[in-house]
Image (spheres, helix red, strand yellow):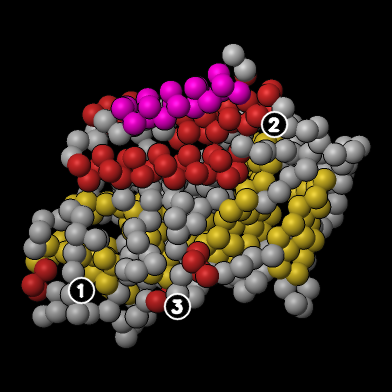
Amino acid sequence: MSETRVAWAGLLEVLAEAGERFAGEEWMVLDDRDVAEAHRTIAHILQSGLVSHAEFDPERPVWRRIVTPTRKFSGDNADAVYFEAPIRGDRTYRITGNLAGAVYTAFTVEAGAFDGSYPDRTDGVLNDMQFDVVADGSYEIVLGGEPRDRNWLGLSADAGRLTSRHYFEWASSAAAEVHVPLTISNLDPPDGPPPPWDDALVAAAIGRVATHVRSKTIDGPRPADRTAPPDWVGRIPNGFPVPQAPGDLALSAADAHYSLGRWLLGPDEALVVTGRWPECRFASVCAWNRFQQTLDYMNRPVSRNRATTTLEPDGSFRMVVAHADPGVPNWIDTEGRPSGTLFFRFFLPEGDVEPLGAEVVPFAEIGT
């Protein structure tokens, strides 16, 4: 049997196991809605593996968009565009791009990410305050090699992937509309073209996809085995921890402060969230399902940024998380879900971010 057939059979086995376990009682998936969303999540992760990891070549890297309105996992964002590219720690790369109107742009090195696996940690970040941008918004960055005074980001020996983040504060969803010009090239390119695809190479590509799916489903921590979450992750429903920086947590943004809370509401209840946007480069809140997928931001008001938030006379905000339009500003649509996640992001805040308030109230009393 060819290596490709063996790898293909292995991928099918991973998908079958994920369908049974990740979409089953082991991951506390019990009702039909959760079963459906778990399988949708697996399908989106499979799509990600095929798009970004199957034809993965750090010698000839290509930027691939990580999440889209139809490919969601690991906490996507209606106001951001993310790309990833394969890299090696012993190579030097040139990146060119344009801010394209983004209020925050950054590049993060992901370490320990090989053959489709989940990275171990972040290992270096360079944001647009740390590299030169010319008048038309364009820039050039060197990645790896000998240190440079400006526009340079070093690479650790186990660097395996580069993530780019592009955040926008628009009145519409940037994730659905924006085009971000971006290139990456190896400054130490190999001689000649890559070898033609053969049995071993195709088998390896399929293997990377299988590893990617495993790492984000059945190789991840089960709910019963999870260790204590970071301090910025809420443990009690309908409350939010003080926003904090995430440290070197893999795939996190080192320049951000996070606060994650969960709503748990009865059919006639709403959650009122109060707070104040800090002075910062970007701020937003997104509603997720239990699998860290944004709700339907193409058709529903499931996220808010500073451009889409109506402020109170004193500059604070009051958001209403509810199953139906309460007839007041700043509604966040739960899609009728009794539970879900709200994730606040604050990039490069000036000083501490004020705590968020939350109160469960009868839905009928919202407008009174």
| In the image, residue 3 above or below residue 230 | above
> Which residue corresponds to mark 1?
325
**Residue type, label 3:** Ala
Residue at image x 73%, y 32%? Answer: 197
Earlier in the chain: of badge 3 and badge 2, it is 2
Q: Position of residue 129 (x, y in %)?
A: 68, 64
> Which residue corresponds to mark 2?
158
| In the image, residue 218 above or below residue 110 | above
- Residue farthest top in this picture: 1
Range shown magenta? 4-22
Badge 2: how crowded within 10 Å, few (<14), some, or many (20+)? some
Task: Classify residue 342 as left or right of residue 30.
Answer: right
Q: CA distance from mark 2 to mark 1?
A: 49 Å
Badge 1: how crowded within 10 Å, few (<14), some, or many (20+)? some
Q: CA distance from mark 1 to mark 3?
A: 19 Å
Q: Secondary structure at mark 3?
A: loop
- Quadrant where the image shows the C terminus: bottom left
Q: Secondary structure at mark 1?
A: loop
Contact check, label 1 and label 3, Cβ < 8 Å? no
Earlier in the chain: of badge 1 and badge 3, it is 3
> Which residue corresponds to mark 3?
171
